Amino acid sequence: MRKLRNLFLILFLLFGLLWGGSYLLHRFGDHHDRVSSDVLLEQIRDVAKLVTNEGDFMEIYAYEDYWGYDISPLRKKALVRAKGHALVGFDLDQIDMDVREEDHIIVLSRLPQPEILALEVEIDYYDLTQGTFNAFAPADLNRIESDVRMKMRQKVLESDLYRQATVRMGLFYNTIHALAAQTGWSVRYKDQLHLYELPRS
């Protein structure tokens, strides 16, 4: 009788363990993702920017660092390909305009210089090798990406985009002159010394 009771007790415990285990697996076994996203608009500004040129750039950037001796356990290196897309133009908010209605003259001053209005850089790591005693830290990767973006910006500055933008801006001013002349107005530029008409060539 005691053996039968012990057998029932053991079977009851086994059933309880199996039921409890299956409940826990069912309750916690399903994978759940919970994502929350809040987009906050901080500020809206009115801008007047004229994009005159755009250019695509590509650069291969090689980085290497080692301690003491240039051997594999002490060396880390990275090979990075960077693709850049640059927009060059003018910030028209810088222009001061004085309208002289009695003389039918528009006086422009503080004409802007060409500048990089936007630069998007896409970075791909082709090779990221680190030694046993010289591994990459997040600060290293941040420094590499910052250096790549800086070099890409320098490449844009040294390109022909600025000269082309200046030519395009000259055509823009010529268009303003032509439109003003059709209505009996003239456009002039004010520097520190005198007033003179912008060249039409």
Image (cartoon, grey):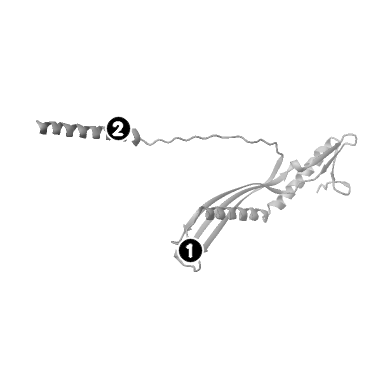
Q: Residue furthest bottom?
A: 69
> Whole-percent x and y of residue 36?
49, 34
Tell me what residue is drawn at x 44 percent, y 64 percent. Answer: 73
Q: Nearer the viewer, residue 63 or 75?
A: 75
As measured in the structure, the alpha-carbon distance from the residue carrying label 2 to the one carrying label 1 is 52 Å
Q: Which mark is residue 75?
A: 1
The circle on residue 141 is: none
First in sequence: mark 2 or mark 1?
2
Placement of the N terminus among the 4 image quadrants:
top left
Amino acid identity at mark 2: Tyr
Identify the secondary structure beneath mark 1.
strand
Q: Residues within 10 Å of mark 1 (few under 14, many from 20)?
A: many
Q: Position of residue 7 (x, y in %)?
A: 14, 33
User: Residue 107 falls in which quadrant of the image?
Assistant: top right
Say left or right for 191 vs 87: right
Q: Residue at x 76, y 43 (%)?
A: 94
In the picture, the disc for residue 23 is: 2
Q: Position of residue 76 (x, y in %)?
A: 49, 61
